[in-house]
Image: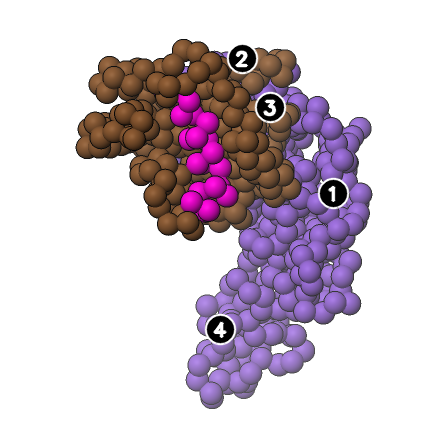
Amino acid sequence: MSAISQLKNQSAFDLLRFRRNPAAAFFTVILPLIFLVLFTSLFGNETFDNGAKLATFYVPGILGLSIVSATMVNLAITTTTRRERGMLKRLRGTPLRPWVFVASQVVMATIIATFMTVLIVIIGRILFGVSLQFSAVPTLIITLLIGAASFCALGLALSTIIPSEDAAPAVTNAIALPLYFVSDVFVVTEDAPKFIEVIGNIFPVKHLVSALQPAFDPFVEGSPMEWGHWAVVAAWGIFGAVIAMTRFRWTAS
Amino acid sequence: MNAIEVRGLQKSYGDVHAVRGLDLTVHQGEIFGFLGPNGAGKTTTIEILEGFRERTGGDVRVLGQDPATAPLSWREDIGIVLQESEIEGELTAREAVRMQSAYFATPRNPDEVLELVGLADARDQRAAKLSGGQKRRLDLALALVGDPKLVFLDEPTTGFDPSARRESWDMISALRDLGNTVLLTTHYMDEAQNLADRIAVIANGQIVAEGTSNELAEQVAAIPRITWSIPTSPETAAVPGRFGAVADGDRMVIETNDVLNVVNELTSWAADPANGATDALADLEIARPTLEDTYLRLTADAGEASAEPSTAGTTGRSKRGSRSRGGRR
């Protein structure tokens, strides 16, 4: 089998596993939707100074959370689990090229992230009247791809520092949850203390969310190129990839 | 070309020498039993052969290649059943085998492999729902689907009930008929005896005996043992020193090939009222050690020998004369 068909095959089986795993489906698909409905229902009708509804802020915020969840959180947990249960070791004993396996994980996670993007765009439109700005769709697509790839790399990097299967969800959420709060996912950080803003600006989640916002901004013109935000997200992705490549283990500790 | 060729294999973890100068030859098409107690170096050795661990020294050839530097294509011909490896529980048995088959250039038909390991009826069950025995069959199916020339089985029946073990044995024997070479590790002598064409006993990081199970029995020269209970009453006379009896636990033991004469003399001595030894030979027994006994002694001896570094390189054969008694069991 060629590398490309192996890649398609492995991604398909991993997607199948994802679909049959109720916990993964709940945390990756259902929970973000619950957040979207809750936060937007509670605060969505408040308005910014420019008259835009807060709902236009929550949709890209929760979308950012969904992307991080489908990629970083998902891969950190599944990769650790597979390693600790000896599944990676079994893979290592076959002629499957390691890059094909890693790429299939990225493809699988990116497909889930894309599915979530479509779902959130539809729900945002139907329930909360937040329209996707078609002129800015290229910005959305580029952000989604850079974001998914970078947070996949960070997820694989995280798996290398997580010691056990039990620790995987705890460590991953302990990192992701606080980041959501300082990254314009749940609350606007505009008037927040300086240090919150600084922390948010250092880490990649806020830049991901910021680059997602133009696609839902009713005042957007054309398709803005978010070079600054993309650069920060990509830099973190490269950092993650380096950690993952140098520290990756196929066998349980 | 031999399937596996190992010369002077060494593996150290810091100051711990897990494998110390191990030699091993596995011919093509045979089932080779690699037998030893836990901690003897079995898994370390097999993982070096599988290319999962780096060795500290020695030469290793597996299917003609050095596992440490072999290209990925080398793995096309190798099937591995790991000691501890879970199967993706969300997949059915058939899906798991199909997923694995895609990793190989010329795989076997997944359905035929499931048939071969006796999982045809359970193929649409999720792996998580399979019984322990069925999971091990699926493990074997995953190892076979790439159509390997050489199959590594690391303790394939550990934790099985007796009937599940029998079934596995039948399945492993069937591999030989497929033309596969099999390297099987186990800590059960009966398993090695039942399955393996040839057996190597590893203890303390070295091979201490090697051959067919018959040769092994000969090699360690199961010398008959005459034993009896050590008398509890102090009035009973001790057996004269000329018999060379030694205490082993609560039994006295004489090892001799001249059973008839020794027993004759012993009993004459005990029967003579002048010696006051009428109870001296309670529970007298004559027995030829089983291969299991021999194996336990071999591995226990090697454990003791490890305390003396000078014995490194000693083989089971040359140790026969100087064996210390009362090995750990």
Residue at disc 1, secondary structure: strand
Horizontal arrangement in the rendering, residue B210 relative to residue B254 (left or right): right
Q: Residue, x 37% and y 50% (percent of image)?
A: A193
Q: Is residue A210 magenta?
A: yes
Horizontal arrangement in the rendering, residue A48 relative to residue B68 (left or right): left
- Which amino acid does the dot numbered 2 rest on? Asn
Q: Toward the viewer: A97 or B60? A: A97
- Which amino acid does the dot numbered 4 rest on? Asp
Where, quadrant-wise, is the N terminus of chain B in this rendering?
top right
- Which amino acid does the dot numbered 3 rest on? Val
Q: Chain drawn purple, letter?
A: B
Q: Which mark is residue B250?
A: 4
Which chain contains the residue that carries disc 2?
B
Picture coordinates of residue B173, whole percent (x, y): 56, 28
Callouts 4 and 2 in the same chain: yes
Picture coordinates of residue A249, whole percent (x, y): 58, 41
Q: Nearer the viewer's eye, disc 1 or disc 2?
A: 2
- Which amino acid does the dot numbered 1 rest on? Leu
Question: Can you identify the residue that label 1 sits on?
Answer: B24
Cα separation, mark 1 vs mark 2, equals 33 Å
Q: Are marks 4 and 3 in contact (CB under 8 Å)?
A: no
Q: Residue, x 40% and y 25% (percent of image)?
A: A213
Q: Residue, x 22% and y 30% (percent of image)?
A: A46
Q: Is residue A64 above or below residue B22?
A: above
Question: Can you identify the residue that label 2 sits on?
Answer: B109
Cα separation, mark 1 vs mark 3, equals 35 Å
Residue stretch in magenta: A197-216
Cα separation, mark 3 vs mark 2, equals 22 Å
